[in-house]
Amino acid sequence: AQSVAQPEDQVNVAEGNPLTVKCTYSVSGNPYLFWYVQYPNRGLQFLLKYITGDNLVKGSYGFEAEFNKSQTSFHLKKPSALVSDSALYFCAVRDRGSARQLTFGSGTQLTVLP
Amino acid sequence: NAGVMQNPRHLVRRRGQEARLRCSPMKGHSHVYWYRQLPEEGLKFMVYLQKENIIDESGMPKERFSAEFPKEGPSILRIQQVVRGDSAAYFCASSPGREPDTQYFGPGTRLTVL
């Protein structure tokens, strides 16, 4: 079985400050890891994914995520937050060797304060 | 290249009626996934289809729910005899099917059961 935990329901950060949205995962094999962002009344937009190789993955809109195998974490980061980054962020995982469906975390609401 | 299309965007049904949700995948994508998002929750996998085949329906309720992806036309998620608990946002995603695979999501259909 695979699972994802996003321990923070809400993250607030001031504009211009660095932001981190946390994610930990559990899979039986090796993971594919994803971050998606959801704006109000919209679908999910793909931000970035970890497949293999470099543990630091760069994605859209200046976001990046760091894969840490020993801590089974895949935290989303951005060096300087924008007000427009305010949205709901979802981490997702799937086991490489098994089914294609994604397992999502419960989401973290990011609010960037001007 | 148009993204994943879903229609209708909003659907209101009375208890006992049928709901039909449509999903047209991105051009070149042959894999379709359906997810359900209940209020204040993350997305839960329902079903994974390829053209004319259901690959994995482990997330589908055993009764009243069905899905298809015909050779021609969109994928359809059908809910018979809807109940208030079916009220949710239903998201479709598509992918090209080549590993490592990334799923791209549509805008969703928001179903309200009165």
Image: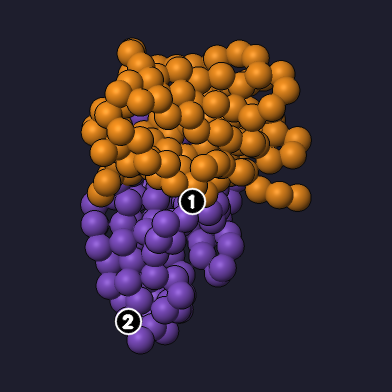
Chain colours: A purple, B orange
> Residue A2 location, x and y as percent?
36, 29
> Residue B22 location, x and y as percent?
55, 33
Q: Residue at x 74, y 39 (%)?
A: B27
> Residue B93 location, x and y as percent?
55, 38
Please give left or right for residue B4 compared with residue A23 in the image.
Answer: right
Read off the residue under disc 2: A113
Are discs 2 and 1 located on one and the same chain?
Answer: yes
State which tag comes first along the sequence, 2 or 1: 1
Q: Residue at x 33, y 13 (%)?
A: B63
Of all chains, the one bearing label 2 is: A
Please give left or right for residue A82 compared with residue B81 in the image.
Answer: right
Q: Residue at x 27, y 46 (%)?
A: B39
The secondary element bearing badge 1 is classed as loop
| A112 over B107 or under it: above or below | below
Q: Are marks 2 and 1 in contact (CB under 8 Å)?
A: no
For residue B76, what is the image quadrant? top right
Please give left or right for residue B96 compared with residue B62 in the image.
Answer: right
Q: Residue at x 61, y 13 (%)?
A: B53
